[in-house]
Amino acid sequence: MEKSLIDQRNLRDLMPALKNKKYFNYGGQGPLPEPSLDAIQHSWQKIQQLGPFTNNVWPYASHEIFSTKKMLGSLCGVNSKQIALTENVTSGCILPLWGLPFAPGDRLLISDCEHPGIVAACKELATRKDLEIDILSIQNLRKGVNDLETKNNILLQLLNKSLTPKTKLVVLSHILWNVGTIMPIKEIGDLLHNHVNSPFLLVDGAQSFGQIPIQDAASHADIYGFTGHKWACGPEGLGGVAISERVLAESNPTLIGWRSIKNEGSIYDTIPHPFHDDARRFEIATSCIPLLAGLRCSLNLLRNEGSEFQRHSKITNLSQKLWHNLKNINHVTPILEEEPETGLVSFLVHSSQPPSKIVEILGKKHLWIRALEDPIWLRACIHITSTETEIEDLTEGIRQLNA
């Protein structure tokens, strides 16, 4: 697609997936814009023209990787050498996690609002390395408190009380995937850094990357995993992780491949540490280079829609409209007692139909939300490509469920 045509159309118009449905599942997967698909196809063609495994292709592939890491490093507020490319947010979190220097008896502190993939990985890690898991109960922590500073202070106080002399790692999402609230990651990072034990901080950025500014959070976390296929509206199969200098100094690689090592030609030599000193030690082997162009294109298209702060403001204005609408429907209860601060709006429909059936009923009206399994709620996600008309249509569809 010609650049002149791209500039004349807003992001919504560039998304074929939004032409025949009202879409509220950005927290699961965002639609891919046409220019991003074109960028992926062009990159694939370029690689085939150069030869997929020739001396001519390596400079192109290296430039694609460098350009993408430079962009991601800027968004995360870290040096590009602290960025590792991964398939998704889960692998971005877990690969460095398993390389941390744990000792038997160390404790992991995990919030009760984490994604099952991360929780399962921590449980298996604890089993293999003889660790203990503590749960930080925050799901209902801030109910009835309207002031944001007070909410954050309550959370920080609870976190501080929950740390033990053996706490080695804290696991927390930047935006809670089920509740939709933003965690004060910068302040949490400072608290842990100044704590006598200085526990590591792992942050799941699945719902934040592409939705809210992440620079302060990512630069204050030890491991900040994110993915391109949700709010960034990039291709599935590509994510990343920002890794602190501390983790790079103290960790070991986990899954190992040729991309993890400095020099393939000397691998049989007696080198005590053959791995990269930067985040590449957590990269493994061959991955899909064309996806990089698609993600960069999507991120640039988002940037064309306004700054991160402007986009976040638009998202919350729309999500708050939906929240108010839901509060006025009989037998419907929004999970948050106060207006949402992100595009995630979770709610309960008090009905004889289970949430999965409600999703199916709404889907037949081309209204697409999702059912959560932990807790068993419904969730609608609002992005900058959402419209007030869509929100009214979803409201009416939910109202008719109990009509």
Image (tube, helix red, strand yellow):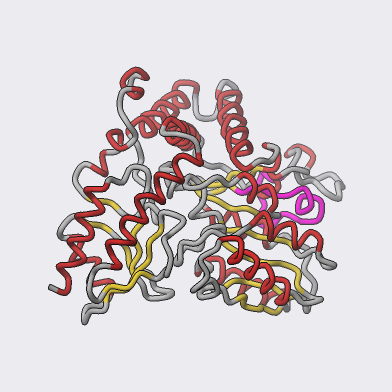
| Residue 8 picture quarter | top left
Residue at left offset 74%, top offset 43%: 278
Residue 134, horizontal then vertical, whole percent: 66, 78
Residue at left offset 26%, top offset 44%: 17
The quadrant the C terminus occupies is bottom left
Residue 76, horizontal then vertical, whole percent: 62, 43
Task: State yes or no: residue 354 in magenta.
Answer: no
Please say if 257 is above or below 338.
Answer: above
The front one of 170 and 343 is 343
Looking at the image, residue 180 sits to the left or right of residue 102; the answer is left
Residue 121, horizontal then vertical, whole percent: 59, 68
Q: Which residues are magenta?
A: 241-260
The quadrant the N terminus occupies is top left
Residue 54, horizontal then vertical, whole percent: 56, 25
Task: State yes or no: residue 251 in magenta.
Answer: yes
Please say if 202 is above or below 308.
Answer: below
The front one of 126 and 255 is 126
Looking at the image, residue 168 sits to the left or right of residue 294; the answer is right
Please say if 254 is above or below 142.
Answer: above
Residue at left offset 57%, top offset 34%: 68
The front one of 137 and 301 is 137
Residue at left offset 80%, top offset 63%: 198
